[in-house]
Each structure stands twice: as C-alpha cells, then as structure tokens.
Image: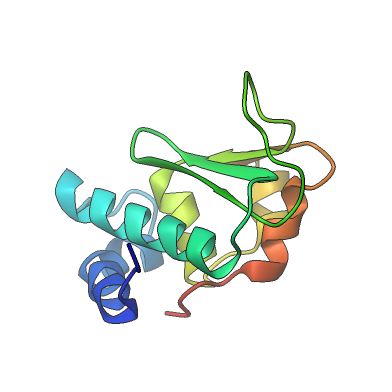
Amino acid sequence: MRIDPQDTRDAVIAVAAWIAGPEEGEKPDRRAIANAVRLTARTLAQESPGHSVEVRVPPFVAVQCIEGPRHTRGTPPNVVETDARTWLRLATGLSSFEEEESAGRLSASGTRAGEISARLPILPL
C-alpha cells in the first residue's frame, strides 16, 4: 500500500503545535499522534526500502528500511527506537538524530542504525 504524501502532511500538521512546542505543551489525542507516527515511519520505509534497520516507535509502529541483509528472527542487528514526539521531531527536521541520541531520547544499536539520519527529515515542517 502506497503512502499518500498529502495524508502524511495532513497527519503531521494535525500535531504540529505539539511537536514544535514545549515538551510540557498540550498533547493531541492519541489517534492523531498514532496517525502521524505511522504515516511518517511508513513513508521512511517506502522511500528507503529494505530490511537492514528496524525503526521502532512504541506503541505505534515498527518498520524495516534501508537496503541490506534481511533480518528474520529474534532481535534485529540494527535498531532505532524512540518515543512518538521525538520521532515526529526527527521526521519533520525539528531535531537531528545526533541531538536526540546524545540527549538519550533515541537509542540506536548496530553499525547501520545511524544510516536513517541521512534519510531525515521525511517531511520538513
């Protein structure tokens, strides 16, 4: 299923004030956050197909992306995991992979996990 760029843009705009504002700002409803997270992550997977890096944004989505060896069992060798707000800040260019990793809001394991930073932002805000 192809992700429609306009659907992704609409979903991100619906939560833009939350991701661009202060951390303690008013949080949008869970469905709006889930929609924006899923569409941006699936857009990343669509634009960078492959199975060598798994991006996890619990509890909303996990996608595999980046060409390379396919992972089939157990914990993938290259994993990026973060929370919804941090992911959306990365996906929109409001923050950088390095900044979020050094702040402890993003964990990256494996030699290829950092490769997603070259594919961000997905949708500049």
The answer to whether residue 18 is left or right of residue 88 is left
Whether residue 29 is visible = no
From this viewpoint, is residue 40 visible?
yes
Q: Relative to 22, does residue 11 appear above or below in the rendering? A: below
Residue 47, horizontal then vertical, whole percent: 54, 70
73 lies above or below 92:
above
Furthest residue in direction right, as rendered: 111
The location of residue 8, given as percent across then percent down, is 31, 71
View extreme (top): residue: 74
Residue beneath the point at 42% across and 58% down? 42
Residue 54 or 13: which is nearer the viewer?
Answer: 54
Quadrant of image for the N terminus: bottom left
Question: With 67 as the anchor, is 121 left or right in this view?
Answer: left
Q: Using the image as rendered, state which of residue 27 and residue 111 is in the foreground.
A: 111
The figure's colour scheme reads rainbow
Kindly indicate the quadrant of the structure image that contains residue 54: top right
Location of residue 9 (image quadrant): bottom left
Q: Residue at x 58, y 65 (%)?
A: 95
Residue drawn 47% across the image and 71% down it = 92
In the rendered image, residue 113, in percent from the top left (x then y), is placed at: 73, 46
Residue 106: give x, y in percent of width and height. 61, 42
Please state, as top left, top right, bottom left or bottom right, where the C terminus lies in the image.
Answer: bottom left
Residue at 35% in and 68% down: 2
